[in-house]
C-alpha cells in the first residue's frame, strides 16, 4: 500500500495530451531536464496544473511552456517527478516493456550464456532509465527493490513484463532502508510472484562459488558491483598477509587467495551471520587453510591492530554506505578519514591499501580528499595504482552522474619522507 493512493493510475490511462497534468518549472531550472536528468525536485517546480496523485503521469514544461519530458508524480517525495521519456507520448505498457527489453539485452551482450548471466544486476534504476526500480538475478529467482512510490504503482505491470521475458521461478521483494520516510512507500519484504526462494542460493562469480541468503542478507543478498574490483585487487596480493575489513560473504578474501596467491587473509565483519556465511563459502571453495575469520566492528578492530603494532602487507576496506543523507555527509567524510588513517598505520612500508566507498553522496574528489587527510594524519605517502568503479551491469548514466556511486582506489602506502 502507498499512503494517499486509493487507485492504480494505469487503470485510467490518459490518451490525450490535454488530459495529462502539467508540471511547469521555475525560470532557469529547466536545463538539467533538457539534458535528461531524471529527478525533478520540489524546489524546481513553479506550478502544477491538474490534480495528479501518487503515480500519475505528468508532462513537464519549462517556464515558457516548452515541452521537456514525461514522468510520474509523487507529492509525498522531495523528488516530485521522476522523468522517463523525452518524447511527448504516453508512458504505456509498450514503453515500459521496451525499457526492460533494452536492459535485459545489455546483460546478454555483457555475459552471453555464461554463468554470470544468471548472477548479475538485471535492472539498475536510473542507469537503465527506470528510476526507482532495481532488479537482481540469482539463477531462477529475481530480487526487486522499489525506491519510487510513483513507479511502484506500476508494480503489477512491470513484474508481469519481467515474468514474461525471463520466466523466473519466483520474484522476491526486498525493501530499502528509510524508503517509507523518503517516498511515502509502505512496503515490506516478501513474495511478489511465483515461488519463494530457498534459504540459500548458490551462484558463481570469478570462478568462485557463493551461498547467498537473498531473504535475510544485506541489500538483495550479494554485491555484484564489486565483481571487477575483487579481481583487480587480487593482482597485487601475491604472497601477502591480507586484512579484509567488512568481508560480508568473503568475496575479496577468496579472490585474494584463488586469483592473487595471498599467503593468508584475516576476514572481518561486524555481522556474525555474515561471518558464518563467509566461512561456509570458504569451505565450499576449499580455502579455509588460508582464511581466518573474526566478528568485530571495523573501527574497533583497526584501533586494536594499531595499538598492538600489528602490520599487514595489504588491507582491503569495503565499508557499508556511510552517507545516506546529505545531512550526514560531513560525518561520513570524517569516518572515511579515520578508517583510512588507521589502515595506513597498520600497513607495512610499501603495503597495498584497497579502499572503497559505495556512498553515492560522496564524490570521487571528496573520497580522494579523505585519503589526503588520512595520509597527512598517518604521516604516509600514498600512490594510487589503479582506480575502479562498479561492474558494467551497474551502468552509469551520463545524464545522471549520481549513478556513478562506487569508488575503489588501489594504493601503495609508504612512510612519508
Image (spheres, rainbow, N blue to C red):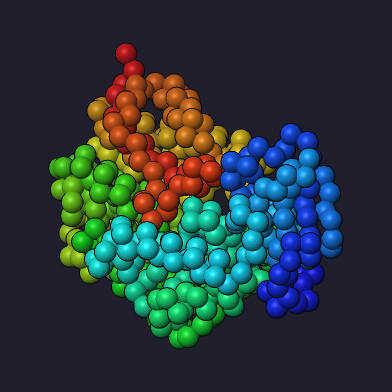
Left/right of residue 283 with respect to residue 60 in the rendered view: left
Quarter of the image for the N terminus: give it: bottom right
Depth order, front residue of 232/122: 122
The C terminus lies in quadrant: top left
234 on left or right of 135: left
Seen from the viewer's position, the closer of residues 74 and 328 is 74
Q: Is residue 105 left or right of residue 47?
A: left
The residue lying toward the viewer, choosing from 376 and 145, is: 145
Q: Is residue 296 above or below residue 411?
A: below
Question: Percent from the top left, x then y, of residue 339?
Answer: 45, 38
Displayed quadrant of residue 111 = bottom left
Picture residue at 70% right of the left edge, 40% below the top: 30
Measured from the top left, where is residue 366 in percent x and y?
A: 51, 31
Task: Give how far across and how far down residue 403 sits, in percent.
Answer: 50, 47
In the drawing, does residue 61 fall left or right of residue 247? Answer: right
Q: Nearer the viewer, residue 221 or 248?
A: 221
Amino acid at each position: 500500500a502507498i499512503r494517499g493512493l486509493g487507485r492504480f493510475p494505469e487503470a485510467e490511462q490518459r490518451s490525450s495530451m490535454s488530459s495529462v497534468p502539467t508540471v511547469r518549472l521555475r525560470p532557469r531550472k529547466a536545463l538539467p531536464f533538457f539534458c535528461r536528468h531524471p529527478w525533478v525536485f520540489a524546489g524546481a517546480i513553479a506550478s502544477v496544473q491538474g490534480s495528479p496523485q501518487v503515480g500519475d503521469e505528468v508532462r513537464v514544461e519549462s517556464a515558457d511552456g516548452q515541452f521537456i519530458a514525461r514522468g510520474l508524480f509523487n507529492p509525498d517525495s522531495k523528488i516530485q517527478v521522476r522523468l522517463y521519456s523525452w518524447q511527448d507520448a504516453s508512458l504505456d505498457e509498450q514503453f515500459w516493456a521496451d525499457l526492460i527489453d533494452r536492459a535485459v539485452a545489455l546483460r546478454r551482450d555483457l555475459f552471453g550464456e555464461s554463468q554470470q548471466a544468471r548472477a548479475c544486476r538485471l535492472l539498475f534504476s536510473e542507469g537503465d532509465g527506470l528510476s526507482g526500480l532495481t532488479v537482481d538475478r540469482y539463477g531462477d529467482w529475481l530480487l526487486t527493490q522499489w525506491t519510487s512510490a510513483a513507479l511502484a504503482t506500476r508494480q503489477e505491470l512491470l513484474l508481469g513484463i519481467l515474468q514474461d521475458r525471463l520466466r523466473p521461478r519466483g520474484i522476491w521483494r526486498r525493501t530499502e532502508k528509510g524508503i517509507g520516510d523518503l517516498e511515502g512507500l509502505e512496503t515490506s519484504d516478501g513474495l511478489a510472484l511465483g515461488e519463494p526462494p530457498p534459504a540459500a542460493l548458490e551462484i558463481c562469480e570469478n570462478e568462485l562459488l557463493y551461498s547467498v541468503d537473498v531473504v535475510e542478507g544485506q541489500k538483495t543478498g550479494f554485491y555484484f558491483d564489486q565483481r571487477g574490483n575483487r579481481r583487480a585487487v587480487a593482482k597485487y596480493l601475491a604472497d601477502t598477509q591480507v586484512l579484509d575489513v567488512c568481508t560480508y560473504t568473503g568475496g575479496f578474501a577468496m579472490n585474494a587467495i584463488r586469483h592473487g596467491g595471498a599467503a593468508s587473509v584475516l576476514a572481518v565483519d561486524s555481522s556474525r551471520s555474515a561471518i558464518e556465511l563467509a566461512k561456509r563459502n570458504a569451505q565450499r571453495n576449499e580455502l579455509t587453510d588460508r582464511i581466518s575469520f573474526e566478528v568485530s566492528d571495523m573501527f574497533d578492530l583497526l584501533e586494536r591492530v594499531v595499538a598492538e603494532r600489528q602490520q599487514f602487507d595489504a588491507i582491503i576496506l569495503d565499508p557499508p554506505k556511510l552517507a545516506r543523507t546529505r545531512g550526514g555527509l560531513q560525518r561520513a567524510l570524517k569516518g572515511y578519514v579515520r578508517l583510512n588513517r588507521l589502515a595506513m598505520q597498520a600497513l607495512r612500508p610499501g603495503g597495498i591499501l584497497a579502499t572503497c566507498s559505495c556512498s553515492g553522496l560522496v564524490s570521487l574528489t571528496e573520497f580522494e580528499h579523505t585519503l589526503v587527510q588520512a595520509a597527512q594524519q598517518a604521516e604516509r605517502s600514498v600512490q594510487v595504482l589503479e582506480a575502479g568503479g562498479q561492474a558494467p551491469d551497474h551502468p552509469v548514466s551520463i545524464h545522471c552522474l549520481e549513478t556513478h556511486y562506487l569508488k575503489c582506489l588501489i594504493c601503495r602506502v609508504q612512510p612519508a619522507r
